[in-house]
């Protein structure tokens, strides 16, 4: 191998090592959209210089992730036989309503306020925000299904294991999409908040 070929290989490896990597293993974010993420990587988001600009967004996501986790725990406890139907219903039903309400409220603020503003600031990130918009549409459909199932649950005094399994499956579907959505969204949005 010639010296120039060796150099070229070394450069390729360097570029590969230096390229910013989004956090989610199935991230949809393209490398071209990560120029701000590169300037403000996740290990600095909560540092003293940035926390006052970034924490409100991260804490909303943390709150929704916590609610999601609690719902899954209650559902798991029922399916493991640790709690009875009546306790399962009383614990999960109102929490699902609050969870759906919080998510709709959060997406609405993003769709009508923040995302259009971010696209005006960084038109080159438009395609990234369109992915997040489509996630919201997909999440809305899942949440509507969850709402219908939860209304049936709230009015059902008789144990209905099939219904509880449907609720569980919708919670899993929502959780998987939310995990990808929140992570990609944070990788795009938090550097914008921190650096402006
Ligand atoms: Fe979002
Ligand atoms: Fe969000």
Image (tube, rainbow, N blue to C red):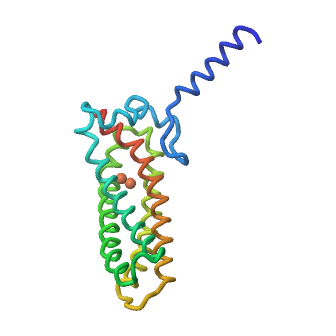
Pick the front one: 94 or 120: 94
Judge left or right: residue 1 versus residue 129: right
Q: Quadrant of the N terminus?
A: top right
Image vertical order of residue 78 relative to residue 65, above or below: below
- As drawn, which residue projects farthest toward the right? 1
Image vertical order of residue 41 relative to residue 139, above or below: above
Task: Name the residue: 57% across, 21% down.
Answer: 14
Judge left or right: residue 136 versus residue 5: left
In this figure, what is the number of numbered marks? 0
Q: Find residue 46 and report its horizontal and vertical position in percent.
A: 30, 37
Q: Quadrant of residue 40?
A: top left
Q: Find residue 92 and report its horizontal and vertical position in percent.
A: 35, 74
Image vertical order of residue 150 relative to residue 6, above or below: below
- As drawn, which residue projects farthest toward the front? 82
Q: Find residue 193 and report its horizontal and vertical position in percent.
A: 30, 39
Q: Quadrant of the C terminus?
A: top left
Pick the front one: 84 or 182: 84
Image vertical order of residue 32 relative to residue 115, above or below: above
Q: Find residue 80 and report its horizontal and vertical position in percent.
A: 48, 74
Ligand 1 appears in which quadrant?
bottom left
Pick the front one: 39 or 92: 92
- As drawn, which residue projects farthest toward the bottom? 158
Task: Name the residue: 34% across, 68% down.
Answer: 100
- As drawn, which residue projects farthest toward the left? 52
Task: Name the residue: 38% across, 34% down.
Answer: 43
């Amino acid at each position: 191998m010639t010296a120039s070929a060796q150099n070229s290989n070394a450069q390729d490896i360097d570029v590969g090592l230096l390229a910013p990597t989004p956090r989610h293993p199935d991230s949809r974010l393209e490398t071209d959209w990560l120029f701000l993420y590169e300037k403000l990587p996740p290990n600095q988001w909560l540092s003293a210089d940035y926390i006052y600009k970034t924490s409100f967004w991260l804490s909303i996501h943390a709150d929704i992730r916590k609610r999601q986790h609690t719902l899954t725990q209650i559902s798991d406890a029922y399916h493991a036989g640790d709690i009875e139907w009546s306790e399962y219903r009383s614990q999960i039903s109102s929490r699902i309503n609050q969870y759906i309400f919080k998510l709709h409220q959060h997406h609405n603020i993003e769709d009508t306020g923040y995302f259009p503003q971010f696209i005006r600031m960084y038109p080159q990130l438009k395609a990234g925000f369109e992915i997040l918009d489509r996630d919201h549409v997909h999440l809305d459909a899942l949440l509507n299904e969850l709402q219908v199932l939860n209304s049936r649950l709230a009015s059902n005094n008789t144990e209905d294991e099939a219904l509880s399994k449907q609720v569980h499956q919708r919670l899993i579907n929502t959780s998987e999409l939310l995990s990808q959505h929140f992570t990609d969204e944070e990788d795009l949005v938090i550097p914008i908040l921190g650096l402006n």
